[in-house]
Each structure stands twice: as structure tokens, then as C-alpha cells.
Amino acid sequence: MENQTNYTKKIILVLAFYAAFALIAWTVVSGTAYGFDAPVREFILGLRNGVLSAILVPFAYSGNWFCVVPICLVLLILPKLRWTFGIPVASSVLTAQLFYNVLKRIFQRERPDWSMHLVKEHGFSFPSGHSITSFMLFAMLAALILYYYANKGKSLPVYQKKPRQAEWYFKTKKGAYTAAWLCLFYIVLMGFTRIYVGVHWPTDVIASWCLAVANMTWLTHIFLAKRQK
């Protein structure tokens, strides 16, 4: 079973990042976030050029439901991936969807000036749905990839009553860590892109990442933490 010290550290981490989200939310509600958002957004929009836009505008759509849902469905439908990847990844995505849909309706923050949008978006701005969803999807993928590599495909601890051995996983350190770093790169690039295409404020993205870190801490605990037999 996971020792008490590690468990306590996880609780502190979860509470710290939920508190960080709450602090950012307070700056949004009070209007003080604009002092940070405006110059950062102006700087990022100043980076716009034809080549970068040709790459980032299509990339921005990879965080939409018509890309995320098929990924989850494929992982859930394929028998060899359903329990090892599908259930944990789908759980992460559903958690992200629940959090951001509820919070958007609570805060009802307007998006930045629509005249600067490079993609079509609707609804409220805070927090960024694309940012939290992509974070939780690819962070869970990265965590699973590293877990299976380190444990040679051993079943996740959550399945101790009915072990689910991974039939597919990276067997080399280079492959596993390259895949994990690519997941991290996607997360960061998606957050940057949401500001670049003009549909989010920087604090929308940062707050989403705070929520995602907190949520991923307890989700990975559920799926990956060792349990007492």
C-alpha cells in the first residue's frame, strides 16, 4: 500500500493547485487579471505570421470534440486497449468535461475581442476547455506509457481483483520517454495555441492547467497507486 507520506504529499498537491485555480478565478472576477492578460496576450498575438498560423490554426482544431471523442472511442472499442488505456483516458476526459462545463457557466467570462479570432468559437472563456481536456487526456496517456514501461506491462493497481496485463506498451526507455515528452509538448502547444488564435485569455489557460494538475493527481492515484492486498 502507498505509504502515508506519499499520500499526504498528493493531498497537499491537489489542494495547492485547486487553491491556485481559486486565486486566478478571484483575479478574473475582480478584474485584476486583465493587468496580466493584456500584455501577455498582446505579445503572443504579435508573434502571428503566415507560416505559424498555417500550422497552429489547424492544430487548434485537434482539441475539438470530433478529435478527442474518436481517440477515446478507439481506445475503448479495441479489446487490447480498453482496460489498459481506454478506461483511464476516457475517465480523464469526462472529468475535464465536467469541470470546465460547470465552471464556464459559473464564471461566464467573455472571450477576447472576436475580431482577433482565427477560429470560430462560442460560449464562455474561463476556464479553457481545450486546455484542460488536452492536458488530462495526454497527461494520462503519458502516465500510462511510463507506468507500463517501468512495470513491463504489469496490470494497473486499480485492477487488483481482476488483473489487466497490457498487451501493447513501449518496451524501450527511449520509446517510452519520447512518447511521454511528445504528450507534454502537445499539452503546452495547445495552451499556447488557444491564446494565439485569439479565443482565450492567458489566465484561462493557466487556470485550466491548475485544475488539470489537481485532477490528474487524484485520478492517477486511483488508477496507478499501489493498494494493500
Image (cartoon, helix red, strand yellow):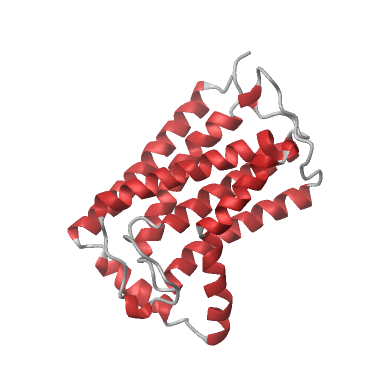
72 over 83 or under it: above or below:
below
**Residue 20 showing in the rendered view:** no
Residue 141's x, y, as percent? 63, 46
Residue 218's x, y, as percent? 48, 34
Residue 129's x, y, as percent? 42, 55
Q: Is 67 placed left or right of 103 in the picture?
A: right
Q: Which residue is at 62% across, 51% downward?
A: 71
Q: Is 26 placed left or right of 120 in the picture?
A: left
Q: Foreground residue, 47 or 122?
A: 122
The image quarter containing residue 182 is bottom right
User: Which residue is situated farthest in the top direction here?
Assistant: 229
**Residue 58 showing in the rendered view:** yes
User: Which residue is situated farthest in the bottom direction here?
Assistant: 50
Q: Which residue is at 60% across, 36% downward?
A: 87
| Quarter of the figure that contains the N terminus | top right
Q: Foreground residue, 120 or 197?
A: 120
154 over 66 or under it: above or below:
above
The image quarter containing residue 39 is bottom left
The image quarter containing residue 229 is top right
